[in-house]
Image (spheres, rainbow, N blue to C red):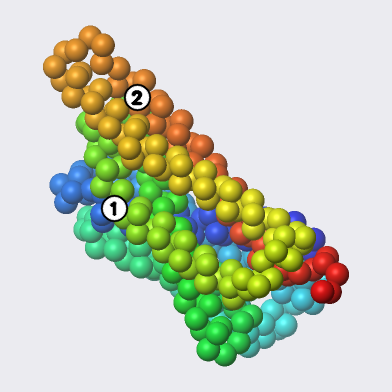
Amino acid sequence: MVDDPVLIGIRFALYADLMLVAGLAAFPLYALTPGERRAPQPMAAIWRLERWLCVIGLLVSTLGMGVLAASMQGVELLSLEFQPFWDLVRETDVGVAWISRSAALLLALAAAIWLTRRPAMAAAILALAGSIAVATLVWSGHAGATEGSAGTLHRVSDILHLIAAAVWIGAIGAFLLLTSPRRIHEIPDAARLAARSLDQFSHIGTICVLVIAATGLVNSQMIVGAENLGRSLGSPYGQLLVAKLALFGLMLALAAANRWRLAPALAAALSSADTDNVDADPASSLAAMRKSLIIEASAALAILALVAWLGTLEPFVGIAPA
């Protein structure tokens, strides 16, 4: 039998990988100008990272399906038999989701390899395929087990929740890529590009936050119910949910600081440097922004780890019946 930590670790890796595939691909579509998308950098770095992410996603997804099948059969992974595995793939929603995810990742990989000379088309195909891959994760969580019309609503809400989160997480990854010391030297005016694209993301980011908050409320109602919220806090599920909300609040605070304080400070420092102001210090402003982004990315990864764990728990396990 495979221990739960193994399944949780695979789920976490898959969430992080697929969200970056979709979110990084979406970034050039709203944050970069057509000229910037055609420039050698930063697009070459994005395409390279996307290829690795697609390959890793395919491998982790296949491993996850194998681990799940082995767990259901009560055997070790290396003792897994093909026919029961194939029956699971063909006859269950989780198996269909795995096939759809694999097809989406193969399409994304093809776009990242052969369509890079048409960056807008490649990014659009990658973003769409990545979003489909992210959407398939819904069938491995609580939404996948909800039946009837309520189940349909739950799955649609969860899909929107995950895609909005992917856009936000992908943007954080793109900003870290743009502000890395290597890219600062490789890309002309990389600091200006980072400051401008962060301002551009503010509108998309607001939409992401609203979607995440609204769908999070729907999902919580579907899984726990407002009338049971207090009782659920006595369970591991409820406690992890509170931790997730606290980390989400931290991300909101950091995003606000980036938008309203750090990005304007960087833009002002760059403008002062243009006028040969000896007091201007763009490097310090850029370092402060990068530090904030690293903390925000760490909080996002912690949330994904909690989401991977929450998907294996029942809301009221460990609580005495009322």
Q: Is residue 84 visible?
A: yes
> Who is closer to the viewer here, 66 or 275?
275
Residue 9 higher or lower than 107, as above or below: above
Q: Position of residue 42 (x, y in %)?
A: 29, 42
Sequence-wise, which precedes: disc 1 or disc 2? 1
So how many labels did they put on this image?
Answer: 2
Which element type, helix, strand or loop, lies under badge 2? Answer: helix
Q: Position of residue 266 (x, y in %)?
A: 29, 28
Q: How far is mark 1 from mark 2, CA to CA? A: 22 Å
Q: Residue at x 30, y 59 (%)?
A: 123
> Who is closer to the viewer here, 320 or 50?
320
Which labelled disc corresponds to residue 203? 1
Residue type at tag 1: His
Residue type at tag 2: Ser
> Most extreme residue toward the top, as rendered?
278
Q: Position of residue 267 (x, y in %)?
A: 24, 30
Q: Position of residue 274 (x, y in %)?
A: 15, 20
> Most extreme residue toward the right, as rendered?
320
Few, some or many residues within 10 Å of mark 2 (<14, 14–19, 20+) = many
Q: Residue at x 34, y 24 (%)?
A: 285
Few, some or many residues within 10 Å of mark 1 (<14, 14–19, 20+) = few
Q: Residue at x 24, y 33 (%)?
A: 192
Which labelled disc corresponds to residue 285? 2
- For the N terminus, the image quarter is bottom right
- For the C terminus, the image quarter is bottom right
Which element type, helix, strand or loop, lies under badge 1? Answer: helix
The quadrant where residue 299 appears: top right
Residue 72 higher or lower than 308, as above or below: below
